Image (cartoon, rainbow, N blue to C red):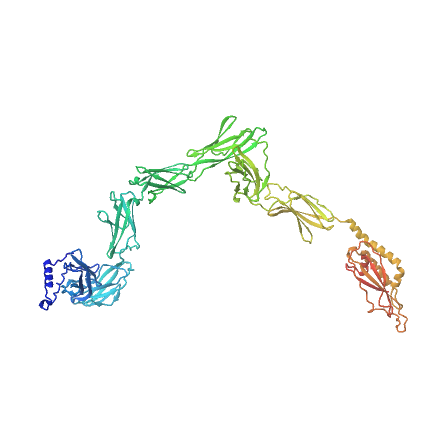
Amino acid sequence: MPSFRIPFFIHLLWLLLIFSTDHRGSCLDTVLQPPSPSIGPLRAASAGQSLSVGWPVSRSGLVGDVHEIQVGRAESHAVVYHRNLSLLSADSDGYAWTWTSDVPLECVDHSVRMRQFYNRTVPSPWSDWVTHYGFRAQDNKSRIFPSDRVLRENTSAVFCCVPPRGVLITGMTFNDEEYPLLGVGAAGVKVITVHKLTFPTTFIKRHELSCSDARPKISYTWNYVSFPPQKPGNLRCFTSDMVTVFCTWDSDRRRNKFDRNIQTHTLHVRNSDQAPIRCNGSPCTFPAVPQREEYDISVVVKDQLGEEAESFSFNISDRVFPEVEVVRLSPGASHATVSWVVRGNLTRLNLLCQVTTDPESSTQLSCSSASGLCEGDVEHLLPNTYYSTRVRCSAGGRLWGGWTRPVSFTTDPMVTLDVWRRIKQLSDPNARQVTLLWTPRVPGSAAPVSIQGYVVRWSQGGQNRTERKDGGQTRAEVSIDAGEHDFTVQAVVPAGAAVPARITVPQRDDGEVVPAEKRLSSLDLSWDAADTATCGYAVEWCILGNASPCTDADVRWLKLPEGNNTLFLPARQFKAGCRYTFNIYGCTEEGHRLLEVQTGYSQELQSVKSPRLVEPARSSSSSVTLEWSYSEDDPAHPAFITGYLVTAQEAGSDRFHESVVDPRRKSVTIEGLQQNREYAFSVSALTKEGPGEATSVTVRTRTNHSAQLAKILTPVLLLLGCIALVWLQRNMLKEVFSYPAGMNVKTPELDGFLRETAERLQAQKAEECSSCDIEILNPRGPDPRPSAPPLQAGYRPQHRPALQPIARTANETYLSEAQALVFTGIQSRSKDDPVFTQTSSVSLSPSACCAFCGGGRQGKQMSAFT
């Protein structure tokens, strides 16, 4: 901006006039005013709606200058802004001041004037108005301002419509919404104010304005909304070859692709004489300055709404990200050799590189090759497996460069053999037959591996022997003597490698004792650790189980390392209900020796076969003895036999059980049974899962003839005893069965009664009746007292309440022998009673009692009157 200098001699003259003034009352008593400032033309920035004005620096030597500035609008110079400025002396030749208008500068004229204060109190005259003229319509069309401009988001904007001279504005709209019109002092110019501008939501990202006048005519224009530039964030720089420097930064807000607010990015290397670098955003590159380590840069972001800047300082040696390219890769069976090159001259930076494979392998090594070509090995890879490798490097381990693109490769195949042996002793004590069994192991699955054959080598009699087998064979039979022999088996493959497998057949041991078999509750094998097992253990079994003959193709084995004396075998690999035997060997330098034999099931089943009963079963009148045959050690059983379950049941009674816990005991005697009864027996084998299938038999117990004879003879003896007693007591019975004179008792009735009693006595069984007491009442004639009434002829006593039978307690015990009748005379009431009754008590045997009582098992009482 040009400056305006007042000639020095004018200032000097002005100062002389001031100091030469007489202060004693003459005409020079009035202080002279300083001269009015001289200001230059206004510079307008329409996009920013700003006015800039400049004026020269005062060289009066006074401390500080105070200026008063006014901004006037329109032809009337209506003051819209007023301010006092206190300015210090500047090093330049002039001052500059900028003011931003709220109304677009095109809408109306804007003028600026100013004056200066001497000693902050004495003002100078105002300068002339300096005017920036607004738009003048040269045609017959109204114009809207601002037009086609980017406006700042979330701010208020004033829009004006400038009509031709003499035309009246009738309305203005913003996005089809009409706003109230305001005047700004200029003839015919109208403005509207829109608050809080936002991004357009229409397909075309702009805001539309219209202006209508009284003719009528409508004018249109468009404006856009955006946001100001943001300060670059996370500014950082690096290099990969010490030749080109890359700088990147982040922006917190992404711009819409239709945003009209175009940004520019400029990178400045402030501590060099390089020209500013124009960037198309992040990243931005510039050439490194030779021999320069320290850099001080800044990035300036600028657009129509403002600008922002950020700075960053760094040492280029600390910001190296080496760029690597893989050159060559040579795979092996378990490793791969990788060669790569580092771009740029970075050997002086002590490069450290990482080589990794996917999956699961990596290595780290230094690279100090002057040519930039480095090489390293990746180990512990699986043969015949797909891999991919990547490389990255770092300068001194500070910042790691990016990984190279993955390079795929396949390791070479490697065939190993798992060898086992079976030894058969021949009839000759010095001759044995060894069957070698092997399984090829081909780790990885990248490609199929063709095995052309196998080579078996061993030594015997001081000579080395070799036998070849086809690729489809996995066994070899060799005859050896009783000594120790070493065997090696190696696969023959066209590509890759084959590792020979070695196994030793121990010397024959005549004193070797086969260990006893142990039962397993599950297929979790464990055994006592053996100090002699210096190279681990081996477990051998037949995949078909013990029920079928085991061929060489059915043999399975598993080798365990030293110190591992447990083995868990998944049950899914074994058949439920099938018994397996596991031979456990200890590995020594002299070969494998048998340590233990264990047998078990992956799952025991309940459905074992039924035993076979030995018939006929031995029985007595109170017991039955059952015997059966069963092969409890049969390997075909689906479970271990733990014992037997015997059940017995009589028809209509409850079943009872008896268990035999010894599986080798195959007989049982069941006692406490009743004679001549039929019982159903069943026998089943027991496992831990429960009883298996049962076999049944029906047995009747024998009859006890001595007891039966006693039952038969007891009634006969009782009858004979009764007859004898009756004969001996016949006179007394006459008295017992006599009746008073005049009573109509017929002899045939008494005879029938006795006959019926005898028949019942003969037919009665001894065990169906208990003993009883019979009272025989023998009434006497009436006492010859005058008061006793005589008995009338034909009297039959129907009810005698005075004579009640005397109760006796029945004997509930069954009698096996005849008992004598005992008559005991008992008097009822007293002899002074009008009627004296002689009572006889008779104790009868059970049979006789039943005859008198009419049968029944309970003791009864019976009275007879005579």
Instruction: Name the residue at the front extreme.
Output: 24
Instruction: Name the residue at the bottom extreme.
Output: 787
Identify which residue, 289 or 853, lies in the foreground: 289
Q: Please say whether residue 555 is visible from this viewpoint.
A: no
Residue 287 picture location, percent across and down: 25, 45
Q: Is residue 42 above or below residue 346?
A: below
Residue 452 picture location, percent across and down: 45, 33
Q: Would you say 5 lies left or right of 805 here? A: left
Question: Which residue is drawn at the image coordinates 53% and 41% (left, top)?
Answer: 566
Q: Is residue 831 above or below residue 549?
A: below
Q: Quadrant of the N terminus?
A: bottom left
Q: Would you say 809 lies left or right of 257 here? A: right
Residue 523 picture location, percent across and down: 55, 43
Quarter of the image where one finds residue 369: top left
Identify which residue, 856 or 370, lies in the foreground: 370
Residue 128 picture location, percent across and down: 13, 64
Question: Which residue is drawn at the image coordinates 24% and 65% (left, top)?
Answer: 193
Q: Please say whether residue 313 is visible from this viewpoint.
A: yes
